[in-house]
Image (cartoon, rainbow, N blue to C red):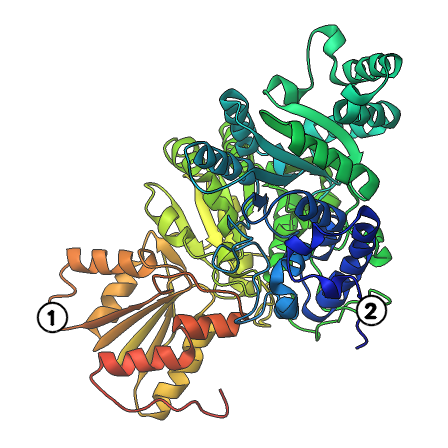
Amino acid sequence: MTRPETPTLDRIAGPADLRQMDDTTLARLSDELRSEVISAVSETGGHLGSSLGVVELAVAIHAVFNTPMDKLVWDVGHQCYPHKILTGRRDRIRTLRQKDGLSGFTKRAESEFDPFGAAHSSTSISAALGFAVGRDMGRPTGDAIAVIGDGSISAGMAYEAMNNAGHEGRRMFVILNDNEMSIAPPVGAMSSYLSRLYANEPLARMKSLAEGFESALPAPMRDGAKRARQLVTGAIAGSGTLFEELGFEYIGPINGHDMTQLLPVLRAARARATGPVLIHVCTVKGKGFAPAETSADRGHGVSKFDPVTGAQAKSKPNAPSYTKVFGEALTAEAARDPNIVAVTAAMPSGTGVDILAKRFPARVFDVGIAEQHGVTFAAGMAASGLKPFCAIYSTFLQRGYDQIVHDVALQGLPVRFAIDRAGLVGADGATHAGAFDIAYLSNLPGFTVMAAADEAELVHMVATAAAHDAGPIAFRYPRGSGTGVTLPDRGEVLQIGKGRVLSEGTDVALLSFGAHLEECREAAMLLEYDGISVTIADARFAKPLDMELITQLARHHKALITIEEGARGGFGAHVLQEMAARGLLDRGLAVRTLTLPDRFIDQASPDEMYADAGLTRKDIATAACQALGRDQKIVPLRSV
């Protein structure tokens, strides 16, 4: 594949080189950098649109500020590809999101130019304020700059941070990257507010002039600039913009792709700021690459693609994804029950509730990047008598944990949690892995916690959740394609707390919770080949546990192995505690609990990540042999 000509970019070893360039050269560098991002992501896949939207901004920030002494914090971090190329990682940019390669987000361990790691949203202002306090208390750090999108700034944490920063009054810079679009079309009053500011282009342009160069203008022009600033900020009416009311000096909006605006404004702000400053920059997601600019999600997440046409590589036909199966099953249940509604936090297509929205748009609520609000909002709907399905990725549901405890579990409200991206997820790495939900939900009194072994089980669990009004209930399922099993015409309501036995043996019992059941089947084949008789059981429930099933497995086998795609302290830990309480560990039974290890696992393919975690079929078979006191070497069969 032919790579773009980048003579200016080729001269860049790090941000210090940008500071030796004139503005015209920096503009040319931006064009080459955009071409390099397109070329690299065409080979790796990844977050293309968000990175293309900040090319000029990344160049301008590094040209104006003294990074890495000045601390640049990218909110979420999924837009950091241009930043990585400019900060000494260009030679590895084509390893993005791959095993042993560059992270798709900012990562402290990767570079001194990544002072704060991220992958969840709305954290940058808080972190930047922390750096500002460190500087003022004598730590060796310079200015703090947070770059946050219009979707991320709608989250409560961002407002908490701005309120605190405004109260502190410390010098710091927040750059609002307003592309009028988060992953889904932005929702809420904040988006409308920013859109109104952007629409007032002539006044906005005069305001940027007034704030940047007001003191250098002749008196008549200076007065006109002041009046323009007053009109935009509302100062005439005795009130400022929202940002100014929070204590920030507000600059903008300015064109984030026009270096003749970006560079002077950033330089003026850096030279003159005494307290917190918010610079409102308007950009276009996917800028400069027509296929991204015109796609529905602006090229947010792409697979490998043709850099000329934008055509993405098509995956081989496969079983439907778990996400799609959930969306269709939920829609089918909603067609039968008008009380079913769905809540998502800026991920309608990612969670599959967009399928429901197409048929019943008034019954789907996208709350934006606001998981805390989304959980309590769902709790309120449950208290009203509706049947809310709160569809949020496992890793993002962590952000609403207090609300799950206080607003849902404590009140026993029947909120249904559909937990996508359970387990290890591949290229997004540790930040997006669904490792902890089994543990953090199973600890809560009155919660019912399920995990789907395959896509047919997922359909049954949607029906079970829809019928369950006795309290909160959750079901988890992985990212990607299902196993290809035949789907039922209609979901069956499962008996709460009852598992199932798929095959019976006498030596060792494999008790699976969730989507690793297929791996357990393959492990059983390895064991049977070596003459070990195996029972395979699907727990279905981590809470309440099927203790009748577990007791039978314990009494009729020499060893019991639990398997789950989650961290320690989850399903296996609950099984051990209940078995100990009932004396089932007093009779020489060998028990092993296979979980994710007590460490974070970096990005790779899901198979590579599970191999790293020690949860392959071979690992399961080896654990069974060791529990039985046998040392034979497990050799994978060709058929498995």
**Residue 411 in the image, given as x and y percentages of width and height:** 39, 31
Looking at the rendered image, the disc whose residue lies closer to the viewer, 2 or 1, is 2
The answer to whether residue 535 is left or right of residue 640 is left
Q: Where is residue 263, by image quadrant?
A: top right
Picture residue at 49% right of the left edge, 47% below the top? 465
**Residue 209 in the image, given as x and y percentages of width and height:** 81, 26
Using the image as rendered, state which of residue 341 and residue 172 is in the foreground. 172
Q: Is residue 203 above or below residue 610?
A: above
Circle on res. 442: none
Circle 1 SS class = loop
The answer to whether residue 309 is left or right of residue 447 is right
For label 2, the residue is 5
Q: Quick check: can you spot residue 492?
A: no
Picture residue at 58% right of the left edge, 25% below the top? 275
**Residue 272 in the image, given as x and y percentages of width and height:** 66, 27
The answer to whether residue 423 is left or right of residue 66 is left
Circle 2 SS class = loop
What's under tag 1, amino acid-wise?
Arg
Other residues around mark 1 within 10 Å, as few (<14) / some (14–19) / many (≥20) = few
Picture residue at 76% right of the left edge, 48% below the top? 56
Picture residue at 39% right of the left edge, 36% below the top? 405
For label 1, the residue is 587
What's under tag 2, amino acid-wise?
Glu
Which part of the image, by quadrant, shows the N terminus? Answer: bottom right
Q: Is residue 556 above or below residue 197?
A: below
Please identify the residue farthest to the left as the structure is shown.
586
Using the image as rendered, state which of residue 472 and residue 565 is in the foreground. 565
